[in-house]
Image: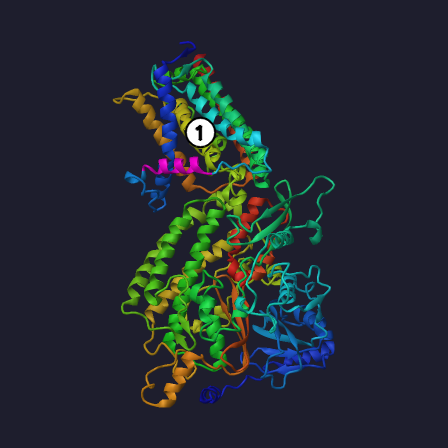
Amino acid sequence: MGICTLANSAGMTDIPAAAPQIVSELTERIGLNDFTIQPTRDGITTIWIPKQNLRAVLRYLKSQTVSPYALLFDLTAIDERMRTHRQALPDSAFTVVYHLLSFDRNEDIRLKVALDETGLSLPTVSDIWPSANWYEREVWDMFGIVFEGHPHLRRIIMPPTWKGHPLRKDHYARATEMEPFTLPDELQEIEQDALRFVPEDWGMRRQSDQSDFMFLNLGPNHPSVHGAFRIALQLDGEEIIDALPDIGYHHRGAEKMGERQSWHTYIPYTDRVDYLGGSMNNLPYVLAVEQLAGIEVPERAKVIRVMICELYRLASHLLFYGTFAQDVGQMSPIFYMFIDREKVFDILESISGARMHSSFFRIGGVAMDLPRGWDKRIREFVDYLPARLDHYDKMVMNNSTLKRRTQGIGAYTTAEAIDWSATGANLRATGFEWDYRKERPYSGYENYEFEIPTGTHGDCYDRCAVRVEEMRQSLRIIKQCLDNMPEGPYKAFHPLTTPPPKARTLHDIETLIQHFLNVSWGPVIPAGESCVTIEATKGLNAYYLTSDGGTLSYRTRIRTPSFPHLQMIPMMCRGMMVADLIAILASIDFVMADVDR
Amino acid sequence: MNTGLGEATDIIGILVSVIFVSAMLIWVERRLLAVWQDRLGPNRVGPLGLMQVVADMIKMFFKEDWIPPFADKLVFVLAPTIVFITMLTGFAVIPFAPGLGIIDFNFGLLYFLALSSLSVYSIVLAGYASNNKYSLLGGLRAAAQTVSYEVFMGISIMGVVMLSGTFNLREIVEAQRDVWFIIPQFFGFIIFLIAIIAESRRAPLDLPEAEQELVGGFHTEYSGMKFGMFFVGEYLGITLSSAIIVTLFFGGWLGPWLPPLAWFCLKTAIGIMFFILLRGGLPRPRYDQLMAFGWKVLLPAGLLNLLVTGAMVLSLQG
């Protein structure tokens, strides 16, 4: 067990609760007495509160305190029944976690509620944050925790006919743990029937005083839903009365897989979460693991990571731009943008060997050093793209038909956006200047000069305009990476770096054993919790990892930006036309893998 | 010049070449769009990919002849033939060159307007008979769009009729010996162009089809040769539209050096390419925006154009 001692002797200490001030405020103002403060690796204030105080605390934090925690960043749960390293935490079978973010304070707070197996229920908070609606449904779906008072507590990711709650530890993870799957005709009938949309189930009326409504099933196969996604529309003529997004068709159990892959072998799975973001998905994951392991990443690796991330941001935004134009009926731009995107992929291919899913980042650094002459292609590209972007401005953004189709369509205010947990460009389009890279720099973003583009109206046009400008800023960042690429190692010299540095393996047996075990079993990451967020292509993407001190993650929570964004669709499209809905969908910039995980 | 039928060989020749040209447009459109979009387009079947049309035809003919069980079968089958037939018969009045044409009669222009209105039945019936909500929306859009834009189309060409003093297309061409009508009737031409794009339901005014919104609109449920009829019908429509634009505004067969038929074909080809370029270039307006634009901009503009032309004609005569 030399490996474990070695890993633990890295001497990681949890950061003790940093902001007891908000805790004493809670005690004073709403009489919160019975709480536990949990030290965590990521330094986010984490308080265990009793169930009966939950709503009062959340309401206080959201609207009554000075500098409130306005954004419900994440709402998830952990099955604690198999967890061994719980130190002094309160007894709990299932823990529900509320992660709030305060823009004014620029800090987060994490509230945990312990539940025992006999009382798996909590009051809903969907009336405090509208975005809690889907999160609570997800927690019910995955863990079977009931939220009392929730308007429609039913499955959201899994099929309605599913038995069991997949993220519970006693639920199987592999098909091989089950009998072979068969689908006889009767079962198929049942499954199909369960997918039928019944307006009454969702409190929708079939007619008004003036007219009978038409219910249109848009998707899960439709040219404009960007994947397998379904929206049931309630229509009066072509006007949308209400809409009901139905997700889960792209669910692959990425979070469950996190519990059976070693820390290292999970990296390629993250690439496929926001599949347009490629290695940018690796970043919050490896950052979180590094935080748990206490690895300090060398400068060169940081700059390489930033450069790769920004290249992927460009690739993703170019695809967004093209499909946005295409969805309002402009046929050609996407072809031009695909050509540019190809060039980005050519660069990424020459660096990592892969195009869309390069899985280039590693725990402690990157997979390999940059190839010889790496900067030539990038330099050419950085010089080439600005002129193309100017050309696209003329073609797309200044086109008057496109403006008429997208300006004032699907607009929301900053307050609404925050209520619905919108992040990234969709939040900035409302005029709110908040970029994670600036506010809480990670991976050395504080060293780069770039601006945060914002919109003003929060409509489809502004959402696109913000992303277009972000591309120019990404180019600026890439240029700075080119000019200031530091020399040095591309991987940290740390026992938990995976694959570990090999230089000394042939000199002493301990390093050889350590290398062998880290490669075959995978690294043992010290017990603890850590959540790292980044400004991903589509908004804030976070990995909330819980390690129980083993070679596997105990719980991998992936907070994706697209999930809450899709929840805003009904709010955005009521009273609009079907054609507007298509423009709205295009402007959100989502991929279903990022929603369903 | 009164009503007169052309030679039988001419008639057959014209119909065959019109259908041939329309079929070849499948290849032309795909290649041209590809060139404009920095792609290659179909280039594998035969030299320059020219045999792509044959490949497409074979594919369509050999596809399962599928009629959805929920469709209104008779109407479902009949609908695609209407567009094909109306567009084809529309060519009857086109004056290709002096002495070359199918029929020559005094109300050629009205005949064209009538047939182009009839073709909308095809779309509306297809949308209705498919019994599919997307098709229905497409059919509804087609009905509203085509019926409205017919009005502006009719009004916009009355200027031409005033200037030439006839509905006979041959005489309209002859009347352009001195100056093509695009010059005195520039506004009429613009209105007519927009109206005829809307009428032929081509992108960017392809709202009844609107792939991104209505999947395939009126032809969502169609496949095989029935879809092929819509497909070729659309290309016939483009050819007919270009031919009529050339006849009304660009002097038909008139032109120096080259034989008249060559001039006519050249001008029509340029018109067709313009239609394809439009498709590649512009985004699609929203349904209510298109209608508002028609009634609030095109209609008053058309009437104003008519008024000014009338005043000009009167003052010149007086």
- Front position in the image: B121 or A132: B121
> Residue A303, percent across and down?
38, 72
Q: Does B142 sit left or right of A372 as displayed?
A: right
- Front position in the image: A21 or A490: A490
Q: Does B52 sit left or right of A218 as displayed?
A: left
> Residue B93, percent across and down?
42, 18
Which residue is rendered at x = 51% and y = 60% of the image? A593
What colour scheme governs how the chains and residues are painted in the rendered image of this protein? Answer: rainbow
Position of B177 relative to A247 (above/below): above
Position of B242 relative to A454 (above/below): above
The answer to whether residue B303 is visible is no
Tell me the residue that label 1 is attached to.
B237
**Callout 1 amino acid:** Gly
> Residue A496, percent across and down?
43, 82
- Which secondary structure, mark 1? helix
Which residue is rendered at x = 32% and y = 89% of the image? A507
Quarter-wise, where is residue B53 in the image? top left
Q: Residues within 10 Å of mark 1 (few under 14, many from 20)?
A: many
Quarter-wise, where is residue B193 in the image? top left
Position of A253 relative to A169 (above/below): above
On whether residue A555 falls in the magenta region, the answer is no
Quarter-wise, where is residue A70 in the image? bottom right
Identify the chain of the residue marked 1, using the numbered disc in the image.
Answer: B
- Front position in the image: B53 or A371: B53
* Magenta-highlighted residues: B50-63
Which residue is rendered at x = 53% and y = 51% of the image? A225
> Residue A248, percent across and down?
57, 59
On whether residue B58 falls in the magenta region, the answer is yes
Total marks placed: 1
The answer to whether residue A345 is visible is yes
Q: Tell me the chief SS of the magenta region.
A: helix
